[in-house]
């Protein structure tokens, strides 16, 4: 989401619609999960960086995929196991920790993202796992403040909503794009 929103604020004339899927642009969506990450942002200290290393272990990766999913059997173990293979590549954990630190620059841009929404009012579909602990639903609802015509769908799912509800989300996207920009 932050990459897409950075592109949108750089070239707003190129944006025909937004599809937001558990992609935060409001501080309301940064709750207790983010506390250790915020501590790292503030200190940039080695100890705070090391405290985040547990987020990169297999148990945490599995949790990210299954937490908040009413039926975890819908999530293929291949999803988190393959994700972990990539996390465990030589040097990649340091890159991930660097990305945790760098994410603060996205939060700094939240006001710019919100100004873009208010000024340009792109047709917007918001699809969010209402049980997402990483980006909780409190981060989805503020979009409506700036995009009153946006469609918001809170789905009984977790962070990786496409893993458990892919066909449902795909149908919402197809319908939305068909109605707003004439594409499927």
Image (cartoon, helix red, strand yellow):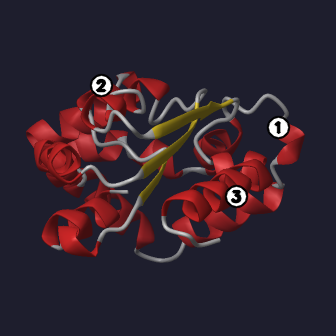
- Tell me if 76 is positioned left or right of 58 in this view: right
- Tell me if 132 is positioned left or right of 45 in this view: right
Q: Residues within 10 Å of mark 1 (few under 14, many from 20)?
A: some
> What whole-number distance in Å separates the C-alpha atoms at marks 2 and 3?
26 Å
Q: Which numbered disc, 2 or 1, marks the residue that appears first in the sequence?
A: 2
> What whole-number distance in Å separates the C-alpha atoms at marks 2 and 1?
27 Å
> What whole-number distance in Å separates the C-alpha atoms at marks 3 and 1?
20 Å
**Label ID, residue 28:** 2
In the foreground, 12 or 108: 12
Percent coordinates x, y for residue 54 in the rendering:
48, 43
- Residue drawn 36% across and 42% down? 24
- Residue 173 visible in the picture: yes
- Residue 80 visible in the picture: no
- Residue drawn 64% across and 69% down? 85
- Residue drawn 49% across and 67% down? 181
Percent coordinates x, y for residue 46 in the rendering:
20, 48
Provide the residue designation for mark 3.
170
Quadrant in which the C terminus appears: bottom right
Q: Residues within 10 Å of mark 2 (few under 14, many from 20)?
A: some
Q: Indicate the quadrant where residue 83 lies.
A: bottom right
User: What element does badge 3 sit on?
Assistant: helix
User: What element does badge 2 sit on?
Assistant: helix
Q: Is residue 68 above or below residue 82?
A: above
Pair 3/1: label in front: 3
**Label ID, residue 72:** 1
- Tell me if 158 is positioned left or right of 33 in this view: right
Percent coordinates x, y for residue 67 in the rendering:
67, 33
């Amino acid at each position: 989401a932050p990459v897409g929103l950075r592109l949108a604020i750089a070239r707003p004339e190129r944006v025909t619609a937004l599809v937001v899927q558990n992609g935060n642009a409001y501080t309301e969506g940064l709750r207790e999960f983010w506390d250790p990450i915020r501590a790292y942002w503030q200190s940039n200290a080695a100890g705070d960086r090391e405290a985040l290393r547990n987020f990169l272990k297999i148990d945490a990766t599995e949790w990210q995929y299954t937490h908040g999913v009413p039926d975890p059997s819908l999530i293929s173990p291949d999803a988190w196991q393959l994700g972990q293979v990539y996390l465990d590549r030589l040097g990649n954990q340091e890159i991930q920790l660097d990305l945790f630190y760098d994410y603060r620059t996205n939060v700094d841009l939240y006001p710019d993202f919100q100004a873009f929404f208010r000024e340009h009012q792109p047709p917007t579909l918001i699809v969010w796992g209402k049980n997402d602990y990483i980006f909780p639903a409190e981060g989805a609802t503020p979009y409506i403040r700036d995009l009153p015509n946006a469609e918001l769908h809170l789905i009984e799912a977790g962070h990786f909503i496409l893993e458990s509800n892919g066909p449902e989300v795909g149908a919402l996207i197809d319908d939305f794009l068909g109605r707003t920009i004439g594409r499927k």
